[in-house]
């Protein structure tokens, strides 16, 4: 049994702050922050220009031909292909996805995204590979 598991599943909580030029958040596991996040600003869930709506979503591993194994966010209303992946500038590098960062540097901007992505993968991937469910709660 994984230490991060509770009742056969793991839930990550993404607490957001909405800004006109980007969405900044903090990703928590069992109430403890593991990294920060950046996303596009809220624009009514429009494809490629908005962050996803608040809600509860299942995470799965997704084999990308271009990028290798990625974490995909499933069940987003009216959206598909939402990934959690490294990026340091939401406006220039994201199209609705979520990027972990170690520190926010501005609205929708951060630094050391690859380091933060490794933190997320170290928590999520072993649980998914063990066949357990992983959920993302966006609030």
Image (spheres, helix red, strand yellow):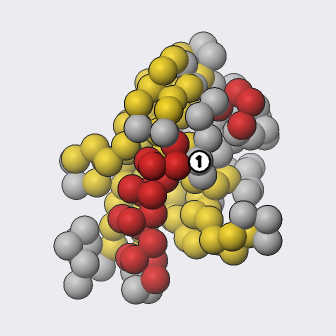
The correct choice, above or below, for 80 with respect to 49 in the image is below
The picture quadrant where one finds residue 15 is top left
Q: Position of residue 89 (x, y in %)?
A: 63, 30
Looking at the figure, which quarter contains the N terminus?
bottom left
Nearest to the observer: residue 84 or residue 14: 84
Q: Which residue is mark 1?
A: 86
The correct choice, above or below, for 8 with respect to 40 in the image is below
Q: Residue at x 57, y 63 (%)?
A: 71
Q: Residue at x 61, y 41 (%)?
A: 87
Q: Position of residue 96 (x, y in %)?
A: 69, 41
Looking at the figure, which quarter contains the C terminus?
top left
Q: Position of residue 76 (x, y in %)?
A: 64, 53
The correct choice, above or below, for 12 with respect to 123 in the image is above
Left or right: 65 with respect to 2? right
The picture quadrant where one finds residue 20 is top right
The picture quadrant where one finds residue 128 is bottom left
Q: Residue at x 45, y 72 (%)?
A: 125
Q: Is residue 120 visible?
A: yes
Count of numbered tags: 1
Residue at the outermost top position: 20
Q: Secondary structure at mark 1?
A: loop
Q: Position of residue 81 (x, y in %)?
A: 73, 57
Nearest to the observer: residue 57 or residue 21: 21
Q: Residue at x 41, y 30 (%)?
A: 103
The correct choice, above or below, for 36 with respect to 64 in the image is above
Q: Is residue 45 visible?
A: no
């Amino acid at each position: 049994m994984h230490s991060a598991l509770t009742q056969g599943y793991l839930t990550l909580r993404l607490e957001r702050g909405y800004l006109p030029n980007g969405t900044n958040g903090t990703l928590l596991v069992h109430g403890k922050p593991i990294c920060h996040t950046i996303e596009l600003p809220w624009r009514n869930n429009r494809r490629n220009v908005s962050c996803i709506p608040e809600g509860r979503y299942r995470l799965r591993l997704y084999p990308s031909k271009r990028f290798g194994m990625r974490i995909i966010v499933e069940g987003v209303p009216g959206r598909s292909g939402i990934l959690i992946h490294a990026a340091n500038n939401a406006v220039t590098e994201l199209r609705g996805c979520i990027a972990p960062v170690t520190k926010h540097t501005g609205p929708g901007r951060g630094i050391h995204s690859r380091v933060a992505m490794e933190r997320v993968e170290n928590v999520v991937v072993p649980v998914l590979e063990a066949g357990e469910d992983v959920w993302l709660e966006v609030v």
